[in-house]
Amino acid sequence: MKCNEVIKHLNDFVLEELDQETEIQVNEHCAQCDTCQKALTERYAVADLLRGSERFEPPAHLYRRVKRNVYVPKKEKPVFWGIPRSFVYAVAMFSLGVAVMRAIDVYVMSIQPAAKIEARTEPLRLEQRSDTVEFYSVPAENLARI
Ligand SMILES: [Zn+2]
């Protein structure tokens, strides 16, 4: 570990908040490097001063001021014309998808000529065979009567 990396970790090292591996690396580096050892000693001195300082209770109005300044208003649900914004976006994306697909269809149909459909009629066979299954066709409007 280099000096600039060790310096970044010194505060956490003094407060014993480093993970074990980093703590070992910082410790080993400080044992060999005078500059970092001196910086570490200074951090320990500052930490000792802070630990020994007198604690005080802040006045109640200070809490109110802090709470007033920290208060974050509750977010309102974003709406468009009374409809939730996410629903409007979903409908818009669906419509966009339909429009894009329709545009692609129109483009593809303009490139490819429509497939030709050939209709043939075969003459009706009147001979009866025992292995023949007969199918009957009925006009659509008469289907309900069958
Ligand atoms: Zn160093």
Image (spheres, rainbow, N blue to C red):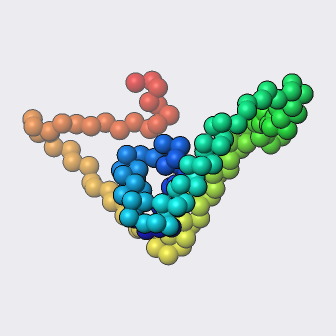
**Is residue 82 rendered to the left or right of residue 131?**
right
At 35% from the left edge and 38% from the top edge, which residue is drawn? 137
Pick the quarter of the image with the N terminus.
bottom left
Marks counted in the figure total 0
**Depicted 47 relative to depicted 55: above or below:** below
Q: Residue furthest left?
A: 130
Q: Nearer the viewer, residue 19 or 28?
A: 28
Would residue 64 be found to the left or right of residue 15 on screen? right
- Left or right position of 30 against 72: left
List the single residue furthest toward the bottom. Answer: 111
Q: Is residue 29 visible?
A: yes
| Relative vertical location of residue 16 with respect to residue 61 in this rendering, above or below | below
Residue 5: x and y in percent read: 48, 64
Residue at the spot 77% in from the left edge and 40% down from the top edge: 78
Between 29 and 73, the one nearer to me in the picture: 29
Is residue 76 among what the camera can see?
no
Quarter of the rendering containing residue 81: top right
The quadrant in which the C terminus is found is top left
- Quadrant in the rendering for residue 29: bottom left
Identify the residue at image location x=55%, y=70%. 107
Q: Vertically, is 71 above or below 9?
A: above
Residue found 40% across the figure and 36% down from its top: 138
Left or right: where does residue 98 sit relative to residue 133?
Answer: right
Where in the figure is residue 112, as x and y percent of width and height?
A: 46, 73
Q: Position of residue 3 (x, y in %)?
A: 47, 67
Q: Position of residue 62 (x, y in %)?
A: 87, 31
Question: Which one is in front, 96 or 35?
Answer: 35
